[in-house]
Amino acid sequence: MPNLPNCPKCDSEYTYEDRDLFVCPMCAHEWSEVDTVANTPVIKDANGTVLSDGDDVSVIKDLKVSGASGSIKRGTKVKGIRLIYDASDGHDIDCKVDGFGAMKLKSEFLKKL
């Protein structure tokens, strides 16, 4: 089975191909492969290096975490990031940070390892 892209509208992984279109059964969104390539923004780290899903990064400055007693310290390594392309709040990285759990981070505070 080929590796199909997630739905760009609802991020569902249950997409399928119908002739030359990809279809999402969860939200009924249809798109072509050309749309996927053309509309995908490039997410870069603090140094301008292009990031991709599964990359390992490190934090370049201490980050306060709301609702937590501590902060994420500079130099903390984060493994296996996932990019978020339609983040309305500016957070474009989804990841798990040791000691904090799942959270979203901004790529401007990270550097690729």
Image (cartoon, helix red, strand yellow):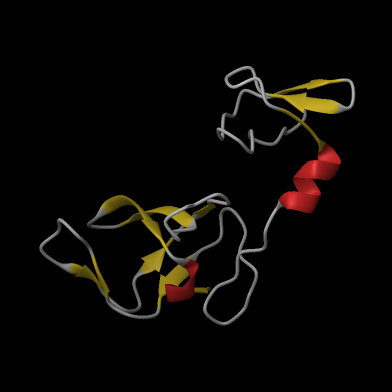
Residue 51 vs residue 102: left or right?
Answer: right
Residue farthest toward the front in the current orientation of the protein: 88
Q: Nearer the viewer, residue 45 or 36?
A: 36
The answer to whether residue 50 is above or below residue 38 is below
Residue at point 67%, 63% (across, down): 42
Q: How many marks?
A: 0
The answer to whether residue 29 is above or below residue 103 is above
Q: Is residue 1 visible?
A: no
Spot occupied by residue 86 in the image (x, y as percentages of width and height): 55, 49
Residue 96 vs residue 63: left or right?
Answer: right
Residue 38 vs residue 84: left or right?
Answer: right
Residue at point 68%, 26% (across, down): 29
Q: Quadrant of residue 9?
A: top right
Q: Quadrant of residue 72?
A: bottom left
Residue farthest toward the right in the current orientation of the protein: 19
Spot occupied by residue 102 in the image (x, y as percentages of width and height): 33, 48
Residue at point 10%, 63% (across, down): 69
Spot occupied by residue 23 in the image (x, y as percentages of width and height): 73, 23
Q: Is residue 17 visible?
A: yes
Spot occupied by residue 55 in the image (x, y as percentages of width and height): 56, 60
